[in-house]
Amino acid sequence: MNNIFVVADLSDSKPVAIQRACELAKNTSISLHIVYFCYQSLRLIQDDPQNIKQALLDAVSHDAKKSLATLVPEGIKYSFEVVWEKRIYEWINCYAKEHNPLMVVKTAHRSETFLYTSTDWQLLRECPAPVFIVSDYKWRKSPNVLAAIDLETKRKTKQELNHQILKSAKTFTQANEAELFVCYTVPFSKVLRDLGIHYKDELEMNAKKTLKGKIEKLAAEYDIPVANFFIKAGEPEKVIPSIAAQKKAGLVVIGTVGRKGLEAKVLGNTAEKILSLLKSDVLALKPE
C-alpha cells in the first residue's frame, strides 16, 4: 500500500508527526492514514459502558476531523480513524503486517524504565514497517542526513541492511537538496583500553586502511563524497549523536534488529540507546 501511517494524538501541543508526514507526502502521490488512539478503563462503570465508549469515540472523531481540516494542506490525500486500543504498538504492528505501509510516523516519547516499555521501543523492536520517530525539539532545523551503517559486518542480512539505509538516506537527501553523511562506529572496549590493548586512534587508523576500498565503492555507487564518510571508535549511542550534531543532521537513518523480552531490557538495543540521545528525527529500518 502506497501510504504513510501516522500515529496522531489530540493531546499533543505540537502535532509534529502529522506535520512531518505532510512534508514527506508533499508533491507525491503518497496518501496518509492518520490514526487517533483512544482508551479509558470502563471496568468499574456500571451504567452502560458501551454507550460511554461510543460517546468517547465520537467526541475524539469530531475533534480529529476538525483538527485535520486545518493541519493537512490542500492537495494531500488522507484518511483517518479513531481506534479504541490500550496496547497501541500491537495494533500498529498488526496493521503494518496486513497493509504494508511505506513507514510508521510517530512523535518521540523517549522515556523508559526497567518495568515499563514505551510504544516507541516496542515499535523499534517489532514493527515490520520502517519507523520514523519525529523529534519535537530538534537542536536546529536542517535537511542534512546521517546514515549509520556497519562496514565490517560479515552477515549478509546486515550487508543488505546497509544498502537499505543508504538508499533511504539518499532518497531523503535528494528530496530536500541536502547533504548526506555516513558513519561507522568501530567497536571499542574500555576494559581492553585500560589493559593497554585497545586505543581509539589505532583502531580508527586500522579501520580506515582496511575499509578504504569498501568506502570508495559505496561512495561511487551512491554518489557520496569519500570525505563524507566518518569512522570513529567508541559506543554507537555516543558516536552517532555526536556526528549528527557536528554535521547538523536533521535526520539520522539507522538499522535495528530488535531484541525482545527480558533480553532487550537487560542488554538493551543500540537503536534505542541512540534514540534516547538524539535530538533529530530518526528513521529506523529492519532487514527486508
Image (cartoon, rainbow, N blue to C red):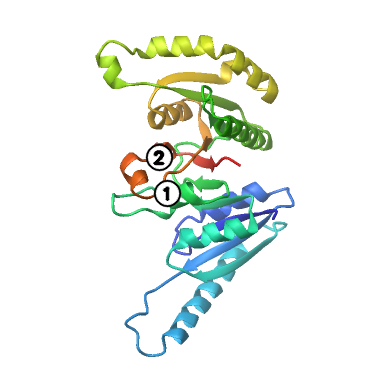
Residue under circle 2?
269
Judge left or right: residue 199 versus residue 134: left
Asked which quadrant contains residue 71, the reply is bottom right
Residue 110 in picture, x, y percent from top left: 38, 47
In the displayed structure, would residue 143 be above or below residue 137? above
Question: Callout 2: 10 Å neighbours few (<14), some, many (20+)?
Answer: many
In the displayed structure, would residue 67 be above or below residue 121? below
Residue at position x 55%, y 20% in the image = 229
Question: Callout 1: 10 Å neighbours few (<14), some, many (20+)?
Answer: many
Asked which quadrant contains residue 67, the reply is bottom right
Residue at position x 55%, y 15% in the image = 211
Instruction: Kindly give the residue lying farthest to the left in the view shown.
Output: 194
Judge left or right: residue 212 versus residue 37: right
Type of the residue with mark 1: Trp
Type of the residue with mark 2: Asn
Q: Element type at marker 1?
A: helix
Q: Residue 121, labelled with which disc?
A: 1
